[in-house]
Image (cartoon, rainbow, N blue to C red):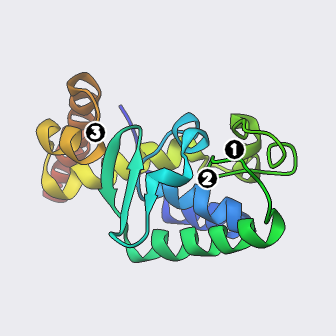
Amino acid sequence: MLQPLLPEQVERSVGAATTPTARLVLALAAVHAARVAQIAALMLDDVDLGNRRLTIAGHARPLDDLTLKLLTDWLDHRRRRWPSTANLHLLINNQTANTTGRASNHWISAPLRGQDATLERLRVDRRLEEALPHGPDPVHLAGLFGRDEKTAMRYADSARSLLEQAAEQHLR
């Protein structure tokens, strides 16, 4: 059964995200439930600041205030650091700025390595967080995160179990 993160685990990861890149990556995993490979594959065209939309793995999502701020901070940093880059990937680094390749999953994950709340755990936690207040509805989860029904069912089943455990503890 999938388990939610504890608030202090999330807080430690937030504290470890000290660069514009790390803060944006953390938000993409924790708010938008994006996988590391999906984050690495993001292109500049996937960001529509004017319409407050972000497309992750072909699924358009509204941009919340936090992610919008972190995106604009990252894009400002990217523009100042590599003003002449031709790389169209959203996230670039010193190795990829002079190429057209994407940043590695390893580089993207590095700032939270060693934390309890890794990018993968934050992604899982976000899906559970969505499933708990809305009930274990796999259709809602599949539509919100653009996931297949099997994955949505797994999250719904975990949410159902967590809700049942909470109800049992409340009755005691």
Secondary element under disc 3, as helix, strand or loop, is: loop
Alpha-carbon distance for marks 3 and 1?
22 Å
Q: What type is the residue that disc 3 sits on?
A: Gly
Of callouts 3 and 1, which one flags the residue occurring earlier in the amino acid sequence?
1
In front: 24, or 166?
24
In front: 15, or 102?
102
What x and y, as percent, mark residue 10?
55, 61
Q: Can you say whether 26 is above or below 157 in the image?
A: below
The crowding category of the residue bearing disc 2, from other C-alpha atoms within 10 Å (few below 14, some 14 to 19, many at least 20), is: many
- In this view, the residue farthest toward the top is 150
Alpha-carbon distance for marks 3 and 2?
20 Å
Of callouts 1 and 2, which one flags the residue occurring earlier in the amino acid sequence?
2
Secondary element under disc 2, as helix, strand or loop, is: loop
Q: Can you say whether 70 is above or below 146 in the image?
A: below
Quadrant of the image occupied by residue 103: top right
Q: Which residue is mark 2?
A: 90
Question: Is residue 9 in view from this perspective?
Answer: no
In front: 56, or 9?
56
How many discs appear?
3
Q: What type is the residue that disc 2 sits on?
A: Leu
Q: Is residue 31 left or right of residue 107?
A: left
Q: Which mark is residue 146?
A: 3
Q: Which mark is residue 109?
A: 1
Looking at the rendered image, the disc whose residue lies closer to the viewer, 3 or 2, is 2
Q: Can you say whether 93 is above or below 13 in the image?
A: above
